[in-house]
Image (cartoon, rainbow, N blue to C red):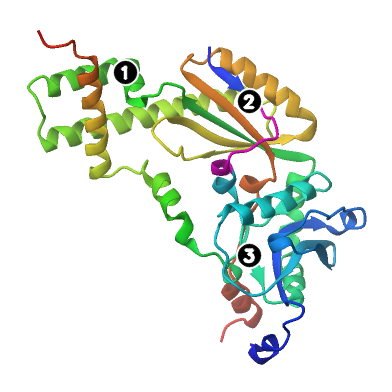
């Protein structure tokens, strides 16, 4: 590694912070005036049919601070509004521009395939949570079996540890079943307006459904209308939130391990 | 009938974090993120994973609903 070189190359940082990958034909008309991480200028690095959207940065470790996360998101939003794109996760820094070009060249097929899959679509988030301030109150009332078990166990004061574990386990099973059934209902409702969907793990007990949908740009209004209609069939203690449009984070599946690439290139030792 | 709020172009920090930290293109060798700041969030996300401790915590929360619902002692 050219460590000596970076030491006296202080004026222009060689590191490249990555934001997104776009098709080359989008580059010429791309407006990239949103400041990048640490206020740096954002520019494309091209190779073949692809371009990476990057900004210069000193090699360093970044903390996921609000300011940095916002800068990353802002650049992505601007790109998303203008071109098909694959978002890069926060905090990915290449040593230099050559490495970025190599990345694009080595994985060109994967990038192009995924770009084709998301072209013309946006990601929307759909989250359902209980609007009840006490989620457990809601569940106890929604599941009579759970209420009966609670009354049984707590009638004589504090239950034993074993009984509590049994109750907790029973609740988790009920909750999982409830979440699954609700997610299935939602998925069924939105299937005509979403090209793909990903169901993610809810973040806390009061959350029932957490999913992402890849929606054709032209169908965003239809998606919202469909969710409105769906909401009418859901209990009134449910709060349904649609978020986005987001860059297609949940529909970009590229985790690149260099070791594998090197092995493949060198063949058997 | 559930309350529905549809996409307005705004996003909460939680929704951003949900996506940008581990989704999208990830180049393992180039990840330059100090995880110190997100510890709490990832722990919160793992609350849902079932464990004995979670079961006990849930049982207590369910038990409390009984106390809240119980009529005032005569």
Q: Nearer the viewer, mark 1 or mark 2?
A: 1
Question: Residue B28's x, y, as percent?
Answer: 57, 67
- Which span of residues is magenta-colored? B6-15
Q: Residue at x 70, y 27 (%)?
A: A193
Q: Residue A143, which numbered label?
A: 1
Crowdedness near tag 2: few (<14), some (14–19) or many (≥20) residues, C-alpha within 10 Å: many
Q: Chain of mark 2?
A: A
- Give the side of residue A249 with respect to residue B61, left or right: right
Determine whether A107 is above or below B18 in the image: below
> Who is closer to the viewer here, A21 or B63?
B63
Determine whether A19 is above or below A175 in the image: below
Q: Chain of mark 3?
A: A
> Who is closer to the viewer here, B68 or A95?
B68
**Residue lying furthest bottom:** A4
In the rendered image, the quadrant that contains the N terminus of chain A is bottom right
Is there CB contact under 8 Å for labels 3 and 2?
no
Q: Which residue is mark 3?
A: A92
């Amino acid at each position: 590694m050219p460590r000596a070189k970076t030491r006296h190359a202080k004026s222009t940082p060689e590191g490249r912070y990555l934001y997104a990958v776009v098709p080359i034909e989008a580059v010429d008309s791309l407006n990239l005036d949103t400041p990048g991480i640490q206020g740096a200028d954002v520019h494309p690095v091209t190779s073949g049919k692809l371009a990476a959207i990057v900004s210069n940065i000193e090699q360093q470790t970044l903390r996921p601070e609000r300011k940095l996360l916002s800068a990353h998101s802002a650049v992505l939003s601007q790109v998303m509004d203008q071109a098909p794109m694959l978002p890069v996760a926060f905090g990915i820094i290449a040593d230099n521009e050559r490495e970025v070009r190599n990345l694009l060249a080595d994985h060109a097929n994967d990038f192009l395939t995924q770009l084709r899959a998301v072209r013309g679509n946006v990601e929307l988030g759909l989250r359902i949570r209980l609007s009840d301030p006490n989620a457990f109150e809601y569940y106890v009332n929604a599941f009579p079996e759970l209420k009966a078990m609670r009354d049984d166990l707590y009638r004589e004061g504090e239950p034993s540890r074993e009984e509590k574990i049994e109750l907790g386990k029973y609740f988790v099973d009920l909750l999982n079943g409830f979440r699954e059934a609700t997610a299935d209902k939602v998925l069924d409702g939105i299937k005509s307006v979403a090209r793909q969907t990903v169901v993610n793990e809810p973040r806390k007990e009061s959350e029932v459904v957490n999913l992402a949908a890849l929606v054709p740009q032209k169908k965003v209004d239809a998606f919202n209308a469909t969710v409105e209609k769906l909401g009418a069939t859901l209990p009134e203690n449910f709060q349904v939130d649609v978020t986005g449009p987001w860059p297609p984070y949940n529909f970009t599946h590229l985790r690149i391990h260099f070791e594998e690439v090197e092995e493949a290139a060198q063949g058997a030792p | 009938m559930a309350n529905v709020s549809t996409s307005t172009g705004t996003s909460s920090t939680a929704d951003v974090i949900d996506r940008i930290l581990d989704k999208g293109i990830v180049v393992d060798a180039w990840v330059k993120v100090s995880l110190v700041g997100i510890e709490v969030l990832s722990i919160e996300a793992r609350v849902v994973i079932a464990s004995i401790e979670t079961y006990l915590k849930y049982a207590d929360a369910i038990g409390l609903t009984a106390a809240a619902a119980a009529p005032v002692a005569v």
